[in-house]
Amino acid sequence: MRYPLLEEFINYLHIEKARASNTLEAYRRDIGGFLEYLERNSIPVEKTASGHIMEYLMERRDSLSSSSLARLLAAIKSFFRFLYLDSLTDNDPASDIEFPRISEKLPDTLSREEIESLISAAPRGRSRILIELFYSTGARISEVSRIKVEDLDFEGGWIRVFGKGSKERFLPLGRPLLAKLSGYIRKRELSPGDFLFSGSDPGRAPSRQTLWRIVRKTASAAGLDRKVKPHSLRHSYATHLLENGADLRAIQELLGHSSIDTTQIYTHVNRRNMKKMHSRYHPRG
């Protein structure tokens, strides 16, 4: 069901805020569910009170994780702030609602030995290059799926990706991987406008599900007895950079984080790893 106010908000996010398509769909899904709740209870949007929002959040609490609940509230807060600032409602019922406390969950990282096992287990060609690219750049799966041949700068040693909100950034690539990429492109006879990790149709971007399955299948072949996702390689990339002395601000830029607070989680991972190392190797650990 289409809701005119929701569509106005989505258009605003798309045109004025340049939000990515998957972000727009998440907002449409989250806010659409809340508007359905209001409709079921015969509550007009302009008559929504903070109590109605709290009741809806309580209703969804059993089916959502704390992080998903926080995301849902963030979407609702953004929606009502938009309505209020555009004078589409007389008040903002979500402004005083606080975010639920989220327990800190440290990112899942692989050791360097596990990374090497993963790369070695990947079949040569697209699968192995994909795994190496994920770990060598820390790029998101949505970014990797949209990489084209023309995004590679072989002379400069860079690759261009488009992150959240279609923000462009350039990531360094090592010479060994660049050489493999060059051979891979020649073998597949790809043109500059072709997608790097496409399937049989080079002009069509691979789905994220396809790339996710390659990582999962390779992890199984490597004998890794836990869930390994493309994001696990992104987390490992950031953690290993920090362990080797990289500056946190530089890691923020490489990951495409808008806030240093998001990158800060890797300092906790690093401290956790140092504690393990101390316990293992120190006589009084």
Image: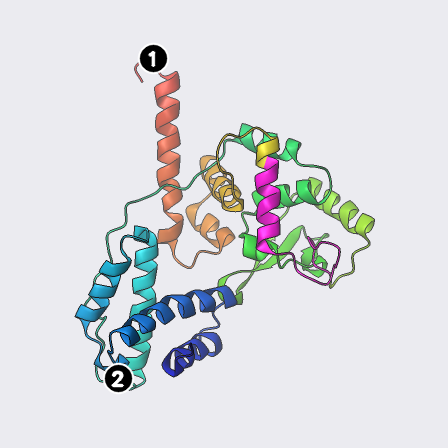
Mark with earlier residue (2, 1):
2
Q: Amino acid at mark 1?
A: Pro
Residue 235's label in the rendered image is none
Image quarter for residue 58?
Answer: bottom left
- Asked if disc 2 and disc 1 are in contact, CB closer than 8 Å, the reply is no
Is residue 201 positioned above or below 83 on the image?
above
Boundaries of the magenta span: 194-218
Residue 210 sits inside the magenta stretch: yes
Label 1: element kind = loop
Q: Which residue is mark 2?
A: 89
Identity of the residue furthest to the top in this view: 283
In-front residue for pair 39/121: 39
In-front residue for pair 238/247: 238
Q: Amino acid at mark 2?
A: Thr
Label 2: element kind = loop
Q: How is the image coloured?
A: rainbow
Residue 263 sits inside the magenta stretch: no
Residue 185 rendering spot, x and y as whole percentages: 77, 51
Image quarter for residue 77?
Answer: bottom left
Q: Residue at x 38, y 77 (%)?
A: 6
Label 2 CA crowd tier, 10 Å (few <14, some 14–19, many 20+): some
Which dot, 2 or 1, sits closer to the camera?
A: 2
Is residue 111 positioned above or below 54 on the image?
above
Q: Residue at x 28, y 52 (%)?
A: 62
Considering the image in quadrants, where does the N terminus appear? bottom left
Residue 283's label in the rendered image is 1
Work out how far the residue at label 2 is from the one at label 1, CA to CA, in angstroms: 66 Å
